[in-house]
Amino acid sequence: MQMEPASFPFLSAILLSCVVGMLTIMLIPEEKHRLIKQVSVVFSGICLLLTLYVFFAFNRKLGGLQFVEHVSWIPSLGISYFNAVDGFSLPNILLTGIVFFTGVLTMWELNTRVKEYFALYFLMVAGVFGLFMSMDLFFIFVWYDVSLFPMYLLIAVWGTTRKEYGAMKLTLYLLAGSALILPAIILLWAKSGLDTFSFVSLMHPGLFTPEVQKFAFLLLFLGFGILAAVWPLHTWSPDGHVAAPHGVSMVHAGVLMKIGAFGILRVAIMLCPLGWIYWAKFMAVLAVIGIVYGAFVGLMQTDLKYVIGYSSVSHMGVVCLGLSTVTVAGLNGAVFQMFAHGIMTALFFSSVGYIYDRTHTKMIPELGGLSRIMPVASGFFIMAALAGMGLPGLANFWGELVVFLAALKVYPLFGVIAVLGLVVTALFMLRVVQKAFYGPANPRFAGLQDVSLWLGTPRIILAAVLLIVGLCPSLLFNVIRTASVPFMNGLLR
Amino acid sequence: MVGSPPHAVDLAALIAATMLPFASFLAILVATRGRPRLSAGLSIGSVTIALVCSIALLALNFQLAAPIQFSTRLIASSGLNIPFGFLLDPLNLLMIVVVSTICFLVQVYSLGYMAGDPGFSRYYAFMSLFTWAMMSLSLSASLLQLYFFWELVGLSSYLLIGFWYEKFSATQAGKKAFVMTRAGDVAFFIGFLLLFIHTGDLSIVHLNSRAALAGISPSFLTLSALLIFGGIVGKSAQFPLLTWLPDAMEGPTPVSALLHSATMVAAGVYLFARLFPFFSMSPVAMSVFLAIGTISMLLASTMALVSRDIKRVWAYSTISQLGFMIMALGAGGYFAGVFHLTTHAGFKALLFLCSGVFIHRYETNDIYELSRLGARRMLVPMVSMVLGAAALSGLPPLSGYFSKEAIMGSLSVLPDPVWLAAGLVGVFLTAYYSFRLIFILLLPGESEAPAGAPAAPAHESDESGHKFQDRVMALPLIILSAVTVILGFFATPLKHFLGASLTARGLAGTEASSWPHMAALALAVAGVSLAWIEFGRKGAKQVGFVDRIPSLYRLFSERWYIDRFYGLLVNVVVDRGISRLCYQNDKKVIDGSIDGICEGTVESGRVVAFLQTGMVQYRLLAMFAVLVLLALYFYY
């Protein structure tokens, strides 16, 4: 694999801006809410700019690993601080940067325990960034848990509906996930005989026997699959979405679930390709069930956040279906869909957050007619719903198109069933829009304010990203294929 | 076969015609929401430029030899190579002129119709969105690009039907329209993806060439043709996805005129014509299309016989006329189908806009009510409406006569006479229901209101604004009436223009005998006469022959129970069936078992904790028990 060392440690700078941001916040007195928020915006803004720089500076012709930073840490165990980006991780890093920044802005009106909230939020995002850029298995595991631990507190303290239940359920599920991942990582480390956790060294086709690969793949797929809300391991995710405060829901649905899919791709698929091929059909079955099932359960929900939660189950099924096709197009579509879904759900939760802060409800029957009172705020939600239906012109369309194309080629029957799920998705999205935003205005909310420009900023950014990527998909596809094409070529050889 | 490169002028005109409406859509949404006049100005300005560009393109390329294609690759990743660009041939030159003309006229008309509406800016934003999507759809160079705009056209339809979103029926209708067309689009989507997997190219020119499909088995060809036709069925409201269109009449009337009669629903027929050479390579598929067109045409005509809602009558008639177009195309009559699309766009938009004037004035959709309130006294709309209805019925010398004649011609060359017979029945029914409505409007029954009753006092206060509204709404009516009168005489040059490309593809039209035209004309006259006897002549009871047969009346007014079926499907199968099952599974089975495990863990912890409460008795008891057990163990 081609490696391009970094002239300046941009990736560490991204991590540092999170950590320094967290430390700075902890040094500010509790009662200075405004200052804390300003500092958060500054540091997350720096982070976003750095990710944007990395995204655009990434050499699309060269591909391979770029911005490589490698420092040996515990040589006896072969653990090293090893960061790099490739075509798979780059869209996810950009996604994290965008969601991070907009998530801070979405919580601009937070009033309770502001300091702790933002400190934990920064810590969680640091873990997510670390996971996406780490090329060392040991660190991947560590970052996974770093991002997990603040999540529990963030939901349990600042959450809303059944927050203790949601937080506990999420934590238990995800710990169960890491209990599956850890043995698999140790197994791979032991079986390789190389005494290294370095991803690059472990990624050699003939390194592991097929039996080891099959076994390790299954553990890793299920472990990361929990985080990616693969059916039937998904029920923590809607509960978690609903319980979390809005900014955390954004990161949770927008980025954390991507960690699961990314883990499947980075660790399970790239290290155990034979296991991947062996279990591909199994993955596809779970994915297709997830797509259709998520949409049907979504039809029954009456809580705005639950609806989005189940739509996430359905959309992450599309990602998983793409991964299961064992084709370049499938990988391209899956990674694209990860990005698109992340931005879309962030837009969803940001809109719901704004609406909830005004109306103090997210129950669909109690809303109704919001379009008359808050046309702009409603407009953003409707736009996210349209993206969720896979409407052309918005990012999700391309992800779904490419995944379905690959799926129809490899598994015609599953492909057809998955595409039929689109009708149900359209039905439940439109129902929510109709019930919550159309109809006569509810007099209870008559005096509410529509979005001001500053409070609307996060949604303007997210909507713009959906539109730009939707109209210019090659922006992402050109990056992703620098990783997918060499990987699949190597596999076929 | 690759088209010749475009001229710079063409390209500039194409970009202006498609991108300006999009720019106006964005500008209205972002900047001018609070300024309705500016929004309307932006939108109408952009559509005017689009209209001028379209006419210029048609004039410049009237002698087009080969299709002009201009495209760039949008996504060029391995395994996916999608050209985006423009294709120019006679068919879409004609189509963009039709689309931009109707868009322009309807947007001008809306200045009057929508005046004072709180959502005025939003209305023009959506109109611009639609103009952009529809123009781009017509000019698409590849099937994927066409699908892209196809969905956006569907979106603008959804937004415009539900434009008055405080009305439950409107939002319900918008949702229904979107979901039903989505059902058809899913088939279309699968169809073109399969085609892409097997041919590797979705360029329309490529698909229409014989060479592209040489290596494909006939059954696969038929399958993909049928799947793509699914999209046409949805968009053009054909059987069995036809019930969304009458409900779509909940939208503002200009919207019905533009989207749900003249242009958007015709996009389905346009797609059929667009891929006509491709479809005609599968005879099986073509006969299925013919059958679907015929069924839709007859079903919708019968529904129109009993409706009392002026807009719904025209809506059913739209379905039935689209059925005629699909019949014509399915029978191989390329020119007949496309020509009927063109003439229909003119006279159906006219009919809707006339109805809009009445609805705007009298605020009711009921034809008997309109008649009682004195609709016949409004000269311009009434005359225009009679013209439009006569064209719809196929009376000479109006445009509809010529296009219907062409359709009968193409049906008569089929070996099986049943299609022609069905077509002739359709002609009779069309004439009957059109003039039923006209006679009811013109000749109020005995319960006429006292003459000179003030009709719409709501508008009286603002006399000058009222006058402006009337004028701005009358102008498009006059233009469209003129079009309806003269368009028929352009049949020959148009046939030559359209045929130039078709003969190049080796699909020459066939000559037909003349008796079907005579029969069609006779039946149209018969239909009008029957309507006269039942509704027109002095002392007529204004009760149609269908009204006298209760079972038939119920069947027709319940729309053949198609809607009931869909209602049951969604309510029982989806909501109470699968959805509930999945939901319960989530709650009871998955969560239930997980919670059960957790509770089990907690419970077992509690049992153990019970031993640790610190009470001496329990400790001693436990110690004793353990000792006994140990003793037993060692003893044996």
Image: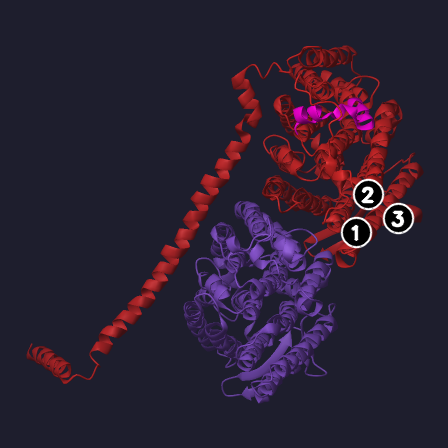
Chain colours: A purple, B red
As drawn, the label of residue B11 is 3
Up the image or down, B160 lies above or below A445; here it is above
Magenta-drawn stretch contains B311: no
The answer to whether residue B141 is visible is: no
Label 1 packing within 10 angstroms: few (<14), some (14-19), many (20+): many
Earlier in the chain: of badge 2 and badge 3, it is 3
Q: Which residues are magenta?
A: B366-388
* Residue that appears at 53% across and 28% down: B561
Amino acid tagged 2: Leu
Amino acid tagged 3: Leu
Place of residue A316 in the rendered image (x, y in percent of width and height, measured from the top left)? 54, 59
* Residue that appears at 58% across and 17% down: B547
Place of residue A247 in the rendered image (x, y in percent of width and height, measured from the top left)? 57, 70
As drawn, the label of residue B87 is 2
Up the image or down, B418 lies above or below A431; here it is above
Observer-nearest of B538 and A387: B538
Up the image or down, B544 lies above or below B238; here it is above
In three-dimensional space, the C-alpha distance between marks 2 and 3, rounded to whole angstroms, equals 10 Å
Place of residue A159 in the rendered image (x, y in percent of width and height, measured from the top left)? 49, 70
Q: Which residue is mark 1?
A: B36
The kind of secondary structure element at disc 2 is: strand
Give left or right: position of A421 versus B572: right
Amino acid tagged 1: Pro
Q: For residue B311, which quarter of the picture? A: top right
Give left or right: position of B596 versus B277: left
Observer-nearest of B509 and B179: B179
Magenta-drawn stretch contains B367: yes
The kind of secondary structure element at disc 3 is: helix
